Image (cartoon, coloured by chain):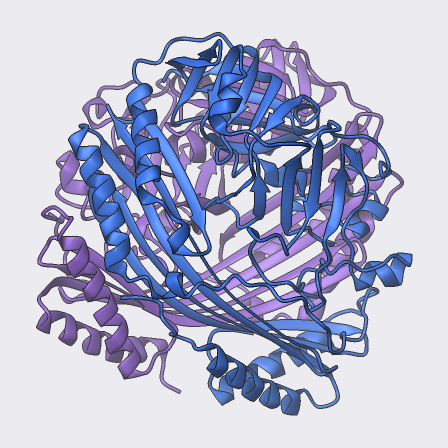
Chain colours: A purple, B blue
Amino acid sequence: MISTKDLGEELAKISFDLAKRDNASYAELRLVNTRSEAVTVVNENPASEEASTIGVGIRVLYKDLGWGFADTDELEHDSIRETTKKALALARGASKLGIKVTRASEPAHVDKWATPVKKDPFRVPTETKYEVLQETTKRMKENDVVARRGQMTFDFIEKYFANSEGSKIFQTHSYAGVSAIVAAKGPTGVQRRSVQQNSGGGYELVDEMDLPAQALEITKDVLALTHAPTIGEGKSDIILSGDQVALQVHESCGHPIELDRVLGYEANFAGRSFLQPDQLGKLQYGSEHVNIVMDATLDHGNGLGTFGYDDEGVKAQRKYAVKNGKFVGYLMSRETAPRVGESRSNGCMRAEYYKLPIIRMTNVSLEPGDWDYDEMIEDTRDGYLMVTNYGWSIDQKRYNFQFNTEKGYRIKNGSIGEMVRGPTYAGITPEFWNSCDAIANKKSWVLWGTPNCGKGQPGQTMITGHGASPSRFRNIRVFGAS
Amino acid sequence: MSQKMEHPRVLLRERAHQIFTTAKTVAGKAEAEIMLVSRVDEYLRFGNNELAQSQYSTSRNLSVRIASEKKQGRVTTGTLDKASIERTVEKALRQARESPEDPDYLPMPGSQKYRSVDRYSEKTVEAPAELKAGHIGSAIDLAKKNHLLASGVLGTSVEHVMMLNTSGLEASYRGSGGYFSLTMDADNGNQTGYALSTFSDIGELDPNSVSQTALERAKLNKNQADIAPGKFDVVVDPYAWSEMLIFFAVSASTGYSPDLGMRQYKEGRSYLSGRLGEKILGDNISIDDDVYHPNQAGPPFDGEGCQKSKVSLVENGVFRNVVSSRISQHRYGVAPTGHELPLPNPLGELPTNLVIRGKGATKTSEELIGELDKGLLITRFWYVRETEPQTKTVTGMTRDGTFLVENGEIKRPVKNLRFNQSLLELFNKIDAVSEPVRNFSEAQQFRILQPGILARDFNFTSVSPF
């Protein structure tokens, strides 16, 4: 059977010959071969599903004036020619309503790259996966518990990319996701506790997460939450858990630095951004403690935003979005980079093969600070610790946000005290990040994964990474979820 | 280019039977079910008055379920040559072997009778890209004339589904649909207007009306006034809450899983567990799950091929029923309503075709605004999430045009507001409704027919800087 790489090379040649003949000024092809598995247990009910897809996405630029994209899962030569023709026809049509496209240059890369994997999940029998999940949900079984859920997901993706400028790149990506959720009903209504992590790599994540052990902890928590008090509305200092900081970075920094949003191309759905180009290098986005990087390299960690090359063949890079609190950089594509005076994209175009690549987050991470976590708690006189997200919402320019968390604790005179249910905080993005006065150090820093970032029309879902450690914010508006 | 007969129905049926023959052979004594889905989508996407992202997509997806000795496995593939199909069935057999026994396993259902639905439009299927580009070109021209930028998408989809199993079931469906979503804006998004129209038959689309609505709202939505948060009476445009009403049927408390199914209700997982017969909404509000409504979409059968029934979930404010399935029939002795998800499904049943309606005569949006003494007109909600499951309290923002109304007239635009609002409470305070429209959301594919409303005391809690 022909390999994905060899098949990709064969199909790219057919497509590019036709595109060149029909006056395309640029063409690229992605052949993507995906295998995935999801295993789930809810209460006593099991479910498993394996999926495999293979297909080609072809993007062409006609006379530097209009883009067209077409995809197919039929890989015969005639089908590739037909798909290329469809992309060309759309590009010709778009060129009539388009403007001159200028693209940042990128060297032609001939290379290969692979996600490091310690334990191949597809060699672990499904029954072993079920054993872990059944033990997890079994340990959650208590009076008042109404829902118990454990899940693991694995993806193995072979991706061949080529473009008409000479790039030929073959990458293999492996991702794993592990989660457990328990819900209980009591005097305070229905409460939820969960644990979740998604990362690059394989079955080693299941071993690291040890869901059965965590099941006991979150079940104890959720039962306590059904009797825990809520919190009153007011201003308070807050410390957020690392996973909550990761989502805060995703929503209030990762999205507003997407340059396509800034330029108005997402105005109809995902929205625009408050971070305008004239603020680059000037706006004090956060306090001096806040440093946020956009880093797709493996040196940053094996995250959901780690790769060798993006989906328009740009090599993975590390750049700052926020440096010492100052807003300094965007997530870009080859087409948008010149619009803010950059000579090179930082490699953020990503999509499934059957979707048009758009600018997506790579690993957008808050760098660790210098606080020991315990010392941060001890240094807090009066406030709340808030742990793990329940709900999240932010306006279309990424200013006004509200996050509610699953559980919290009162902090009094440097000690963690009473548990509280559904603690919620809200604010305006630059004010919030400027109130950050402490970030925990490398010991508490984790590269978290967000497996479900939505953007684009028609809607696309993308995986993104966010490194973060627990952080403290002063004088924030807080209240209870209900 | 059009989507005309890329996958003719008759060929799909033949192809499905060929695949099923192969699947049965490999499955041997095990039960087998196949679902073959073929889709063709065409989207013309535009931004900043440019036709920026045009795409044409074809896909075929085969999903195979194998059941043997009360164990089940499901494997899907997009590769349909004979060897790949054989490998897919072999994988499903292995999945089933390595799975624990499913306590809810039932033998696959046999031949069913289906009430037909007509939601396949030749006009939509044959619509060339040039027609869509023409509609977009007109919107862009209008925006340019008014010194605005047009952004949005006009997309169409054609879907064919075939389902077969070894108990003799055969189900098929074909449907078409599309939407035109448009924003006109200026001043870096500080002045925006939004309009949406959904259709099954592209002939129903009035692109000029969409463009005019977006234009009028954008022109009005300039120099927004400050506003203090608080409770306001509101008129909600029917298209405004396409991302909000899903929370009637999905719960974050159990991990964004389906709700209003019998299994969730009986197990105590549903936010309405134990409340059948209670009055939960205003007596002028009813909610059905009705796939047969002429404006609804999707197949008339569920994830295991059983016919869907119309179910009255809420009647005149009283919580009457939840949806069910063969599994619930077996567990609890209730009548199945055909709302199973593809098996194995540990999450429970899901109503997929909500129809929300008011009692008595409906009103136009203009009439609803005319009846508002003082309050806000909401043209679009955004980023809605559940914050509290029992009361179905959700938070979110307004965007693209929030207007102060006084004495039945739009007075001025105001800045965008955040709300924290219980859906159960809101639907107890509705004074009047408009005719329901089809929702559309990029964020979720949930089919709801939703009315515009005039309601009291909507709870806004903060304001955005724009």
Q: Position of residue B290 (x, y in %)?
A: 67, 51
Q: Quadrant of residue A134?
A: bottom right
State the residue at coordinates (80%, 69%).
B105
Q: Position of residue A95 (x, y in %)?
A: 14, 54
The one nearer the camera, A480 or B220, is B220
Figure quadrant of the N terminus of chain A: bottom left
The one nearer the camera, B330 or B218, is B218
State the residue at coordinates (81%, 57%).
A44
User: In the figure, is residue A182 to the left or right of B180?
Assistant: right
The one nearer the camera, B433 or B350, is B433
Q: Position of residue B405 (x, y in %)?
A: 46, 13
How many numbered marks does the figure carry? 0
State the residue at coordinates (45%, 8%).
B227
Is residue A445 something one can see in this rendering? yes
Q: Position of residue A55 (x, y in %)?
A: 38, 71
User: Relative to residue A14, is residue B392 depicted above or below?
Assistant: above
User: In the figure, is residue B97 to the left or right of B355?
Assistant: right
The one nearer the camera, A80 or A237, is A80
Is residue A297 something one can see in this rendering? no
User: Relative to residue B309, is residue B28 depicted above or below?
Assistant: below
State the residue at coordinates (69%, 68%).
B304
Figure quadrant of the C terminus of chain A: top right
User: In the figure, is residue B88 to the left or right of A221?
Assistant: left
User: Relative to residue A474, is residue A165 depicted above or below?
Assistant: below
